[in-house]
Image (tube, rainbow, N blue to C red):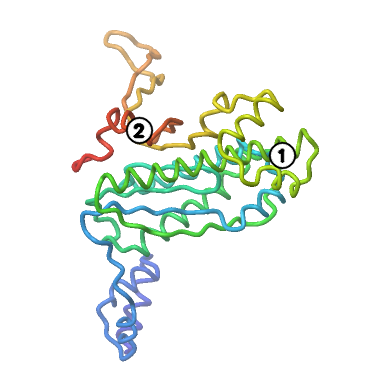
Amino acid sequence: MLCCLRAAVAAISAGCGAGCVRGRFSMAKSKFEYVRDFETDDTCLPNCWIVVRLDGRNFHRFAEQHEFKKPNDDRALHLMTKCAQTVMQELEDIAIAYGQSDEYSFVFKRKSKWFKRRASKFMTHVVSQFASSYVFYWKDYFKDQQLLYPPGFDGRIVLYPSNQNLKDYLSWRQADCHINNLYNTVFWMLVQRSGLTPVQAQDRLQGTLAGDKNEILFSEFNINYNNEPLMYRKGTVLIWQKVNEVMTKKIKLPKESEEKEVEVTRTRTKVVPLHCDIIGEQFWEEYPEILAEDS
């Protein structure tokens, strides 16, 4: 025991820190190690798309207390997208992400080996990275609005065995975006412009179909729903794309004594936001690399 303590002290004195000491004695056994047997095996099935979907927790209250604009707040939507981009940049095995309102879905590659395909690791890494980014970048988008309390997000994992299953999942989320946004657009027009109470607006819209809501928007508020921003109607798709960046660099040319500034173009792979339809086949034909086995 005395030798072990001396070794630990020597390691710390040498600058290794506690982590180095822990690594040195990682193989040590104790009578308490049996508790590891209670851990469940949460390894995701092989050859399946791993989808992590997160949602804001109690975001109705959060939006009210932080005075989000209704029916859509560009600041909040852009902040969500910034957080999702940060997640993808940190976890590069994400092939595509889709977001709308206070939710985002992240799709890990079918053959991903990250975290030994442990579901708990996928979910906790995504949710924790997203939540911390939300707080970190808050001031960049809500310059005059103080963050009153930390936001919360919950997450879940679903496995999809085929490309069609995955496409249908993303189509479902985009269809949900359209349904919710159409309802919210009409609802808040009735409240903000017609002076109805929220209860009255809800009663007015009860039992109405999409055509009825479009008619209310056009006949009463002169709004063509099809002209609303695509970000509201379609949500946001995040994919990896090669982007040319032009930057200025100082170089010294032969036979010249002074450096000169020249423009250099570099190609980099970045996370790019799109606001487009993903229910039809055009998107998938345009970006076949998303579903490619070797992407």
Amino acid type of the residue that numbered disc 2 sits on in the rendered structure:
Gly
Name the quarter where the C terminus is drawn.
top left
Q: Position of residue 93 (x, y in %)?
A: 30, 47
Disc 2 crowd, CA 10 A, few/some/many (<14, 14-19, 20+): few
Name the quarter where the N terminus is drawn.
bottom left
Give the residue furthest to the top. 255
Which labelled disc corresponds to residue 12? none
Q: How many marks?
A: 2
Q: Nearer the viewer, residue 7 or 87?
A: 87
State the image quarter where residue 140 is shown: top right
Give the mark toward the camera: 2 or 1: 2
| 201 left or right, relative to 86 | right
Mark 2–mark 1 Cα distance, whole angstroms, equals 40 Å
Give the residue furthest to the front. 207
Residue at 56% x, 23% y: name it.
Answer: 227
Q: Nearer the viewer, residue 241 or 274?
A: 274
Residue at 47% x, 37% y: name it.
Answer: 236
Q: Position of residue 38 (x, y in %)?
A: 33, 82
Residue 29 drawn above or below residue 258: below
Give the SS element for disc 1: loop
Amino acid type of the residue that numbered disc 1 sits on in the rendered structure:
Asp
Q: Nearer the viewer, residue 158 or 215?
A: 215
Q: Position of residue 4 (x, y in %)?
A: 31, 83
| 23 left or right, relative to 88 | left
Residue at 27% x, 29% y: name it.
Answer: 285
> Disc 2 or 1, which lies upstream in sequence?
1
Residue under numbered circle 1:
144
Q: Position of residue 137 (x, y in %)?
A: 56, 44
